[in-house]
Image (tube, rainbow, N blue to C red):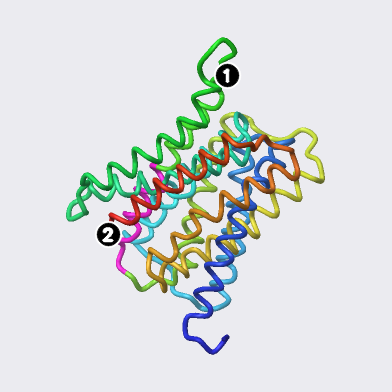
Amino acid sequence: MRSHPLFGAYAALAAVCFFWGTTYLAIRVALETFPPSFLVAVRFLISSVILLIWAKWRGEKFPQGAVLWRTALNGVLILGVANGCLTYAEQLIPSGLAALFVTTSPFWLTGAEALVPGGEKLHAPTLAGMAVGLSGVALLVGPDSFGDHANMNSLWGFALLQVGNAGWSFGSILQKRIPRGINPVVSGAFQQLAAGLVWAVVALALQAAPEHPSARSIGAMLYLAMFGSIVAYSAYLIALDRLPVAIVSVYTYINPIVAVTLGWLVYREPFGPREAAAMVVIFLGVWLVKRFSR
């Protein structure tokens, strides 16, 4: 099996499916004693420095000039905006619910593709798929956000994560338009460095530093840096570089299942018939959008 030419690519995809699913729980654990801006900044600064040292040791080519600046900007969008919004959102909603909301990112990716020159335009089947997926979101958000005992945290968490999804989608499309020639792992390192530096400025401005970080939160932050940023993000870029997008996108369905399971096991986050039905409807909407998009 290992002799298969795409064995490494499929192994990378398996790492994405599992490790990114675990990061939702790790973020919640790290937030027990770390401020969100500090967590995002330190996570990406640690991972980027390790990756850049590895790339230098390997003699990899680094991006230069305009390519470097475009890579950095895309990193701020893909990682800085997306993970920043996710981290802040997990102060409002359970980690499993956050993972389900992030699953709607293909809607943004399809919409962003329609806006860029030469991109595929939206058509009726795609819009219908979006409507199906959003009805699943409404099933999750509606009962909590309206009524006599309304809790707006779900609605605000969803809105925040849609900003993150938009950043991820626009940044990903822009990254695809950068000329190839740089190892995708090296590009990912510079993206993480840019995201970490931007959030470091935010953390300094907010004077966001932990007073008494717990060993549990420190371990979660190091896990995010190693397995969420170095292993999983590098694996994602490798898989995206070598496999069709339709195959890589399977992580969209697996990540929430891993996140929901871990959230229930560790924090006993609520997951009953309503949440299960909403997950199925959201997955159906995502599948329809992918099915009728290029």
Q: Residue at 61% across / 41% down in the picture?
A: 96
Q: What amino acid type is highlighted by mark number 1?
A: Asn
Quarter of the image with the C terminus in it: bottom left
Residue 278 at what x, y percent from top left?
Answer: 51, 38
The amino acid pointed to by label 2 is: Arg
Where is mark 1, residue-wise? 151
- Residue 135 in the image, given as x and y percentages of width and height: 41, 34
Q: Which quarter of the rendering shows the N terminus?
A: bottom right
- In the image, is 106 to the left or to the right of 155? left
Instruction: Please tell me whether mark 1 sits on a helix, a strand or a loop.
Output: loop
Picture residue at 36% right of the left edge, 73% below the top: 181
Depth check: give the residue in front, 78 or 190.
78
Q: Which residues are magenta?
A: 166-179
Q: Secondary structure at mark 2?
A: loop
**Which residue appears at 44% of the width and 52% of the height?**
75
Camera-nearest residue between 64 and 43:
43
Q: Say which mark, if any, is on residue 294.
A: 2
**Pointer 2 and pointer 1: residues touching (CB < 8 Å)?**
no
**Is residue 159 visible from the viewing direction of this image?**
no
- Foreground of the two, 12 or 78: 12
